[in-house]
Image: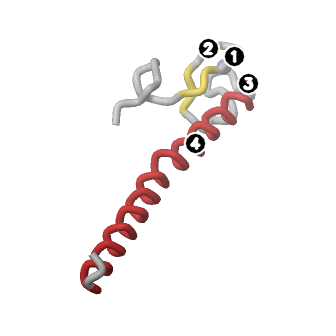
Amino acid sequence: MPGRDAEGGNRVTVCQACGTDNPEGTTYCQQCATRLDAGTQQRVLERRAAHSALGIRWPAVMAAIVLALIITIVVLFVLGVL
Ligand SMILES: [Zn+2]
C-alpha cells in the first residue's frame, strides 16, 4: 500500500545534529554517532501500534460479527423460525 510519508515511502529518523537520514530503528546516527531523538522513535512505535489496532484487528472483528450473524440467520432458517 502506498505510504502516507511525504519523504517518499521509506521511514527514516533524521539526525538532529547533522541532518542525515538514518534507517528506522537506528539508535545512533550513522554519520556523526549522535544519539537520535527518542521522541521520534516513540512516535514511530505509536503509529505502528495504532495501525495494528485499527488496520488489522478491525476487519477481523467485523468479519467475526458478520459470520456470527450469517450463522444465526442460517440456524433460524433451518429451524423454521423465519
Ligand atoms: Zn548525525
The circle drawn on residue 19 is 2
Q: Quadrant of ligand 1?
A: top right
The image shows residue 1 at horizontal and vertical percentages of: 34, 37
Q: Which residue is mark 4?
A: 50
Label 3 CB sits under 8 Å from any ligand 1 atom: yes
Label 2 CB sits under 8 Å from any ligand 1 atom: yes
Residue shown at 38%/60% (left/top)? 63
Instruction: Look at the numbered disc 2 and give the secondary structure of its residue.
Output: loop
Label 1 CB sits under 8 Å from any ligand 1 atom: yes
C-alpha span from label 2 to label 1: 6 Å
Residue shown at 71%/14% (left/top)? 17
- 3 and 4 marks in contact (CB < 8 Å): no
Q: Which residue is mark 1?
A: 16
For marks 3 and 4, the one nearer the N-term is: 3
Residue shown at 52%/42% (left/top)? 51
The circle drawn on residue 34 is 3
The answer to whether residue 61 is left or right of residue 38 is left
Q: What is the quadrant of the C terminus in the image?
A: bottom left
Residue 20: image quadrant is top right
Residue at the outermost top position:
18
